[in-house]
Image (spheres, grey):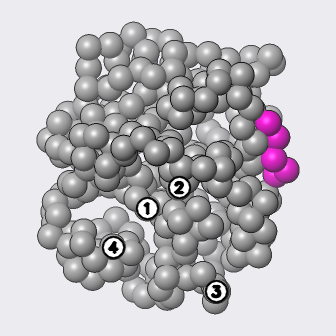
C-alpha cells in the first residue's frame, strides 16, 4: 500500500464562523461545504461522538492542490498543541512568510514563531502561527522545491495547499517499524533537529534537539514525525487535529486497522476508506478508489 496524496485534515474548532473569516481573510481559503456530521461519517472518522456536530470544509485558493481543511465544532479554548503525541501541526506552502507575519498581527492568528531559515543553506524560510482555536500552522517557503525530498509545486497564491502533516511520537523506532510494515513509502533516518516552537510549547531548553524523520508520499506530500518521549502534564483540553485523510493506491489488510474497507459517507471524501491508528494514537484515514 502506497500513500499517494493528502486529501483532508480534520481540526476541532471553537467557532466555525470566526474560523471561516480568519482563513478567508488571511490565507485566502474558501468554504466549500457546510453541514452536520452524520452518524456514519462520525464512525468512519473513528469517533461516534462527532455525530450531530456542525462542520465546514475549506479549500485552498483556486489553482492550488485541493487538500481540504475540515473544521468541526467542539474545541476547548484551553487547547494547546504539541503537549501529547499525535498530530500536532498543519504545514502549508507560502510565498512570503515575512509579509504574512506582519499581516497576521492583530488578527485571529497568533504568530508563535517568527520567520526564520531552517538550515544554514537558507533554502527553507518558515514561520509558525496558531489559529483561532489554537491549531498550529507551519507556513513554509521553499526556494528550490524541485531539489527537495518532497518536490512540492510553489504556490501561485500567497498561501498554497497543505503539503506536510507533523506528528509527535513517543518512540520513533516503533513508529518507523510500523510505517515500513504498513506502507511501501520511503521513510528517512531520524536526524536531530532544533525546533524552537516545540521547545517553547513543551517548556524544554531552547538548545533541545528533537529526533525527526520523514515519510515521503508518491506525490509531493509528506509526514514529519518529531520524537518527544513523554506527554506534558500541562492541561490541554480537546482540540487540534483529530484525523488526517490520505489517498492510497489500494487497500490491504492492516493489523492495526480500526475499521477496514467501508464506502465513504463523509462529504469531501470519495472512495473506500480504512482507518489506521499509528503508534502515537493518531488516526490516519486511507482512501482508495
Residue located beneath label 4 in the image = 47
- Residue 44 place in picture, x, y as percent: 37, 78
Between the C-alphas of marks 4 and 1, the distance is 10 Å
Q: Nearer the viewer, mark 2 or mark 1?
A: 2
The answer to whether residue 224 shows anywhere in this view is no
How many callouts does the rendering have? 4
Q: Residue at x 24, y 72 (%)?
A: 49
Q: Secondary structure at mark 1?
A: strand
Are circles 3 and 2 on residues that touch, CB within 8 Å? no
Between the C-alphas of marks 3 and 4, the distance is 19 Å
Between the C-alphas of marks 2 and 4, the distance is 16 Å
Q: Residues within 10 Å of mark 1 (few under 14, many from 20)?
A: many
Residue located beneath label 2 in the image = 86
Magenta residues span: 188-192
Q: Image quadrant of residue 247?
A: bottom right
Tell me the quarter of the image containing the N terminus.
bottom right
Label ID, residue 255: 3
Q: Which sits earlier in the primary sequence, circle 3 or circle 2?
A: 2
Residue sitting nearer the eye, 280 or 52: 280
Q: Is residue 265 left or right of residue 74?
A: right
Residue sitting nearer the eye, 113 or 147: 113
Q: Using the image, determine if residue 156 lies above or below residue 20.
A: above
Q: Residue at x 58, y 62 (%)?
A: 280
Label ID, residue 9: none
The answer to whether residue 195 shows anywhere in this view is yes
Amino acid at each position: 500500500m502506497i500513500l499517494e496524496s493528502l486529501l483532508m485534515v480534520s481540526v476541532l474548532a471553537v467557532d466555525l464562523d470566526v474560523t471561516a473569516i480568519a482563513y478567508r481573510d488571511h490565507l485566502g481559503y474558501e468554504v466549500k461545504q457546510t453541514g452536520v456530521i452524520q452518524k456514519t461519517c462520525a464512525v468512519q472518522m473513528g469517533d461516534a461522538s462527532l455525530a450531530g456536530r456542525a462542520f465546514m470544509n475549506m479549500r485552498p485558493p483556486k489553482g492550488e492542490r485541493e487538500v481540504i481543511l475540515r473544521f468541526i465544532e467542539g474545541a476547548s479554548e484551553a487547547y494547546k498543541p504539541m503537549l501529547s503525541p499525535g498530530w500536532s501541526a498543519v504545514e502549508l506552502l507560502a510565498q512570503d512568510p515575512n509579509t504574512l507575519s506582519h499581516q497576521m498581527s492583530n488578527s485571529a492568528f497568533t504568530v508563535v514563531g517568527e520567520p526564520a531559515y531552517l538550515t544554514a543553506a537558507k533554502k527553507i524560510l518558515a514561520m509558525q502561527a496558531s489559529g483561532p482555536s489554537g491549531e498550529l500552522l507551519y507556513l513554509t517557503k521553499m526556494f528550490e522545491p524541485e531539489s527537495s525530498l518532497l518536490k512540492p509545486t510553489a504556490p501561485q497564491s500567497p498561501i498554497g495547499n497543505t503539503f506536510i502533516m507533523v506528528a509527535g511520537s513517543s518512540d520513533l523506532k516503533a513508529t518507523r517499524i510500523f510505517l515500513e510494515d504498513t506502507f511501501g513509502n520511503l521513510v528517512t533516518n531520524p536526524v536531530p533537529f532544533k525546533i524552537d516552537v516545540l521547545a517553547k510549547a513543551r517548556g524544554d531548553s531552547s538548545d533541545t534537539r528533537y529526533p525527526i524523520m520523514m515519510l515521503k508520499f508518491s506525490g509531493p506530500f509528506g509526514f514529519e514525525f518529531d520524537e518527544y518521549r513523554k506527554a506534558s502534564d500541562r492541561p490541554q483540553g480537546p482540540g487540534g487535529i483529530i484525523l488526517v485523510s490520505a489517498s492510497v493506491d489500494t487497500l490491504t489488510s492492516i493489523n492495526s486497522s480500526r475499521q477496514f474497507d467501508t464506502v465513504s459517507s463523509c462529504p469531501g471524501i470519495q472512495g473506500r476508506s480504512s482507518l489506521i491508528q499509528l503508534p502515537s494514537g493518531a488516526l490516519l484515514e486511507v482512501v482508495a478508489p
